[in-house]
Structures are given as structure tokens and as C-alpha cells.
Image: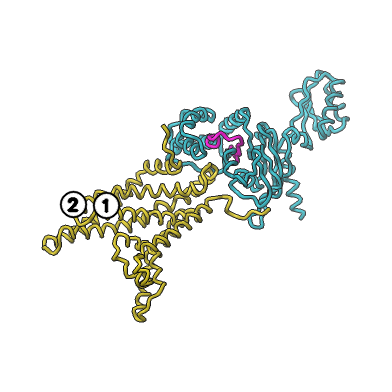
Amino acid sequence: MQRLKINPLLAKELRIRMRNWRTFGMVSLYLLGLGGFAVLFFLTNFYMLSGGYSTLAEVGRNLFSFLSVAQFILVIFLVPALAGNAISGEKERQTIDLLTCTQLTPLRIVTGKLAAALSAVILFIFASLPLYGFVFLLGGVSPLEVLKLFVIILTVALLAGCWSLMFSALFRRTVAAIVASYALILFLLGGSSIIFTLLSAITMQTQSSTPLFLIMTMNPLSLLGWLYPDFFRDVIYAVNTNWAQRGLQLWHLALLVQGALAALSLWVATRAVNPLKVGKRKG
Amino acid sequence: MIRVSNLTKYYDKFAAVQGISFAVERGNIYGFVGPNGAGKTTTLRMLATLLAPTSGEIIIGGVQAFHNPQHTRKLIGYMPDFFGVYNDLKVDEYLEFYGEASGRTLDDLRRDIPSLLELVGLTDKRQSYVNNLSRGMKQRLCLARALVHRPEVLLLDEPASGLDPRARVELRNILKELQNMGKTIIISSHILAELSQLCTHVGIINNGLLALSAPVSEVLARVEGDSLISIAVADRLEEARLWLLEQQGVRDVALVNTGGLEAVFSGDRLTQAGLLREMAARFTLFEFTPSKGNLEQLFMKITEVEKDAKAQN
């Protein structure tokens, strides 16, 4: 029987990761954090429910919204910790030369490392499934919405993974790579929101629209627009009314912009891993 | 098997390697000798396609190394001077990983790994975690890793550094066995005595320049300067001593406690052979043993000359 052929780097990473108590510690912490927030959220809503101010389905819906944003934020901040040491760790351990001497091309090394980081995210998502079972118990959410959420979370993990890998390949030290990854993610999440808010305040006075609002396409939270179309509807109107009327949504553009940024990061990482691309050759 | 032509590597303005050229035939062991910072590691890293040269050419197995690095990497097994390991893997898993990464199938590897571990003497450590191996064992494991994809060429950068004398002897035996298997080996080392016993050819590099590259026998023949000849004659010891003192190249002769003579000789091998012939015709010789000129002597001489030249500049 033909053996399933997977990237040997991915197989090795999974083997090492699953032998490490750190992984189980991280999963436990993740679930404790997410579950703890969910319980707190439910308890605060429980009083509204018992007072008759809200229905069970509404509470379920609200809990789902809360969980989706919480998981989104947790994953986007977890990925740099998982992918930030992917290549810099090999440099620190002095194993990068041995790795590049094999038949693994720089692209396969980078994609193998990315797949290993994503596999950990998939583990976290699967581990959190029982929490979504609780949401289903309350009602107000369809399985398709949960599926959409998981696709969004995996997408954002993939994007953040590419960005973190780039820093991991560029820096020799893991700490520097992780700090740079967090700085970029914080800028994309917070920086773009602040710029957008300032621009909104200015244009509100002048009653004008500006393409500078497109800064929000760099915000990973924009991807949640697929799940919550009303969430960022106004942004695309502010940029161009025609686009909005034709059905173009902010998350379409965000996926395009952030996807391009991730592809560029992957290319930079691949070049940085290739020892023969570093430095110029004459003659 | 390996041909290096005018290989040069600059780090900014610093020339680490300056136009070196040498060739290594299939099945030969080429010893690369030089002081720290001479350019040995830089050259080996270029041969291993881990560093792009500034100029020059490397041909391994008939293919230009930098035009087809993936093909070259299939042909070579590289062992760096400093290397890390994955501590959380077991010995066989470690070799399986590198074997698979080098394009071999797991079934093939599981068949080959026992004999590979036997070669490097780690059979009983197969299920041990790499973390639990001693330095010498890790060194041998790294050698097994370099061999796991059955390369034709081995590039070993200071493989004996940090090893105790016993581990060094074991490593030398393994390398001899690899030579018998037909592997072409380039090995850099500071332990010159060991290299002269092991290598077929030797290259001496200093300040990025290849000062000498030749078969070991030829290199040793070039060693000039004083050498000591131990001589034992059946009788007429004093006569033999006086006769020796008159011969060409003999600078001094001393009587030794064992009842023999020790002659300080300065000259080439032909003169030395003439001396032996003449002496054998006159005296009953039991022993005529010249101390071999060694790589250390030559290495010291070459590096000394360079040092002097630098000091004069």
C-alpha cells in the first residue's frame, strides 16, 4: 500500500510537538481562557434571560459572537508564538545548515514550517469544539455560521503564520522575530483602526469620502465581515458608493490585500532561507 | 569527482578565500589543513552549497554545484564543525527524518539504518533520545546523518574536534572504512598527524590562499630541514660515527644509550638514500630509520613564512 507522503519537516515538527508537555499546557490555557470568558459571558446574560429581557436564542447568538471575536484574537496572538521560532529556532539550534543541505527546497522548508504552525492552530480549534456545542444547545446559530468562523480563523492563522515566518527567517533570534511579528499584528489590528477613526472624525466634518479608508483592508478583523456583513458595511460606502452598490464588501478587499502581504512574506522567507540567495555572486 | 577552480569568497572587503584551485579524484581522502580563520570552513561551506562564492567554479560529479544545488546536495554528505541536534527525537527517528528529507523512502531507510548505526557504533543507542548521547556519540550520529542518503562525497569540517583520544581513533577507523567503501572525502582538521595517516592528498590553506595541494607522499618528500636518523651497526661504532660526520648532509652524530647512533641529517631524500647505500657497503647495518618529515613541520614552515612576510610588510 502506498504510504501517505507528507512533508518530513511537518512530520518531525508534529512528533516533537506532541512529545512536549508545553503543547498540552498551551491547549489547556487556551481552553481555560476561552471557556472562562464564555462562562462569564453566559452568567452576565443569564440575568437578562431570567428577567425575560432576552430569549435563549439571543443569548446563544451573543455568546457565539463573543466567542468568535475572542477566538479570533486568541488565534492571531497565538500564531506568532507558534511560528515565530520556526526558522530562527533552527538557526539558534545550529540545525539550519543541515536542513538546507537536504533535498528540501527553501519553499518546502518554509511551507513545512507553516503547516506545522497551522496544525497546532487546528488542534486548538478542535479542542474548542465542545464550547460551540454549548452554543448550539442555546440555539440562534446555524452550523454554516460556525463553519464560516472556522474558515475565517484558519485563514487569519495562515496569514499571521506567513508574516511571522518572514520575521523568523529574517532574524537570527527568536525573541526578535516574535517581537517583530507582534508589532506588525498590533499595527494591523490597532494602528489601522486608530487611523480609520481619525480619518472618520475628519471626514465627518468635511462630509467627504476618501480612499484612505482602505487602510481598514489591512485590518485582519475585516475578515469577520464574511460572518457579520453588517459589521463593516459603512467602510466600503465611505470609500466608494458604487463599489458598495455592486456588492463588493470590505472583507473581499481585505482578503486580497492581506493575502498579497502574506504571499510577499512567504517569498521573502523563502529567499532568506535559501543560502545561495543571500549575498551577491560575481563572475 | 571534485574540481575547484579559482574559488574566491569576499565578506565585504575581507577576502576569506582567494582563488584556490584543487581537484579530488573518486575514492581519495583530501585533508584540508590550516590555522583558525585560514578559510577552511568557508571553502567547505561553498562546496556544500551553503555559501555562494564571489567568483570561481565548483564541479562535483560533473555538475556545476551552483547551477544545480539540489543535485549537488544529493551527491554530498556534509558535517559542519558546529552543529545542533533535535534533542526530542530518538536516534533512529533522527536519521529517518534526514533520510526522508534527502529524498529516500521510509521503507528503504528502515532497512539501511541498522547497518549505518553499526558502522558508527551506535547500534545499542537506536532507541535512545539524542539528548542522552555523549558529545562523541552525537558526532558519530552526525556522521551517520551525513551518510544517510548514500552520498558519494563526504565533506567533514573538523570532525574530530572536542573528541577524546579513543573517540578520535574510532572516528579514524570509520573514515578508513568509508574510504574502502569508495567514498570521496574532504576533511579539515587541526590534528595534522592524524591527517597524514589517513589522507591520500593534502591541501594547506593559509590566509585564504592554498599554499600547497598534493599527494601526501609528495608533500612529505618536500619536507625539508633537519631530520633525525636512528642507526645501529653490528660493530665499529666509533668508526661509523666518524665516517658519518664526513658525509654530505650529516650535521652531527651522537651516541645514544641504546648503543646506536643518531645522525642529524639535512638534505633531500635522494641524498639520504645515497648515504644508506654507502653506509651499508661499509658497515653491517641493523637499523637505518629516518624520522619521517611530517605535515606539522611543513605546516609550521608555511605559516611561519607567511607570518614573516606579513611582519616585513
Q: How far across and down, in percent of the image, does residue A41 sit?
A: 21, 59
What is the span of residues highlighted in magenta in the rendered image? B144-160
Which residue type carries mark 2? Leu
From the image, state the color of chain A.
yellow
Q: Which residue is mark 1?
A: A32
* The C terminus of chain B - image quarter: bottom right
Secondary structure at numbered mark 1: helix
From the image, state the color of chain B.
cyan
**Numbered mark located on residue A155 in the image:** none
Let me know if residue B107 is in the magenta part: no
Badge count: 2
Q: Would residue B170 be seen by someone viewing this image from the given angle?
A: yes
Q: How far across and down, in percent of the image, does residue A13 sit?
A: 42, 44
Which residue type carries mark 1? Leu
Q: Chain of mark 2?
A: A
| Viewer-side label of 2, 1 | 2
* Badges 2 and 1, same chain: yes
- First-in-chain label (2 vs 1): 1
Label 2 CA crowd tier, 10 Å (few <14, some 14–19, many 20+)? few
Who is closer to the viewer here, A269 or B172? A269
